[in-house]
Amino acid sequence: MAEPRTHRLVIAEVIEETADARSLVFETSPQLPYKPGQFLTFKLPGANGETAARCYSLASSPHTGEPPKITVKRVTGGLGSNWLCDHAAPGTELEVLPPGGTFTPPGLDADLLFIAGGSGITPVMSILKSVLTHGRGRLVLLYANRAESCVIFREELRELAEDYPDRLLVLHWLESLQGLPATDRLAATLTPYAGRDTYLCGPQPLMDAAEAALRSLGAARERLHRERFFSLGGEVFATPPAPAGDTADAPGSTAHVELGGETHEINWPANTPLLDALLAAGVDAPYSCREGACAACTCRVVQGEVQMARNEVLDATDLADGYVLACQSVPRTDRVEITYS
């Protein structure tokens, strides 16, 4: 059975970004390749001596040579954010799952629009730096915060805008000065950029208002990309259980899977998630949270049918295109063809 593919990262530096936000810079790890906009799932102390899993986006870029960095904003009552802000220090070692998430552009040469709020700037910063240093795209960022003192990466954003004046425009929205970013006011600001692929990350009300504003301007739904995070249980770090065998009432299926240029044909027991069946067969399938909340295990059904137990990240367009979550999918036909391409 495949073991959890965890890594251990050592904190090299802690940076105070704002009064309630800290960046944790890790020692460089060549075993941790990632894409701009992805996140890491951390194993942290939980309540009553248990463990908890929390996801934090990488604010660093894999294209600049800088070490991996996450940024954590303290949340009232937040178990993970408060522990990290209070206890993380140089030398602290943390266990993480492989990078996950699909909040990353397919290339670095397209013109893009970003809308971020608060700590939602974290994955956006990773993409911004990647495009500016390794691509040709022109970028616009609308960044909403309560006040100027809450702006994370304020100096870094200013320096990027100065270094790339023809390719990066940063629009700050401060509630203390401009009020809440309502749909109609956002539409007036975003009109010149509504035709671009847009990446949204921040509080739900901001993302809802921004999406409504862009849709009112004619933006296509498939060009709007949201990042969503959910609290996870510590069991995501446990070894997946062995797949149960087929039963007379629920016979299994055969899965034909294309992954990483290789083809695998495996037995897929009934009522067993595809991910568990693949790992049990020795296939190094991608995953992170195993709770249907991160999209790291997204694949596409080419033929046959599956049923998902939970889905928190794929939207109607994704589902219509045949995309499913391997960690939540069980077979509903005798044979299912799957691709990870």
Image (cartoon, rainbow, N blue to C red):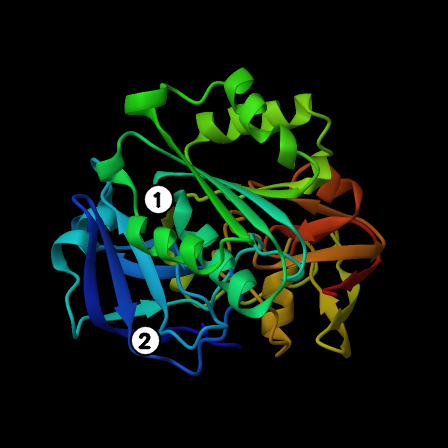
Work out whether residue 133 or residue 24 is closer to the camera in this orientation and state it. Answer: 133
| Mark 1, other Cα within 10 Å: few <14 / some 14–19 / many ≥20 | many
Most distant residue in the right direction = 303
Instruction: State the residue in front, 275 or 192.
Output: 192
Residue where numbered disc 1 is placed:
119
Residue 279 versus residue 58: which sits nearer the camera? 58
Quarter of the rendering containing residue 269: bottom right
From this view, report whether residue 19 is shown above or below residue 212.
below
Report if residue 281 is visible in the image.
Answer: yes
Q: Position of residue 238 (x, y in %)?
A: 40, 64
The residue wearing badge 2 is 8
Indicate the amino acid at tag 1. Answer: Ser
Residue 192, label in figure: none
235 lies left or right of 306: left
Image point (52%, 24%), residue name = 186
Q: Position of residue 300 (x, y in %)?
A: 75, 56
Q: Quadrant of residue 307?
A: top right
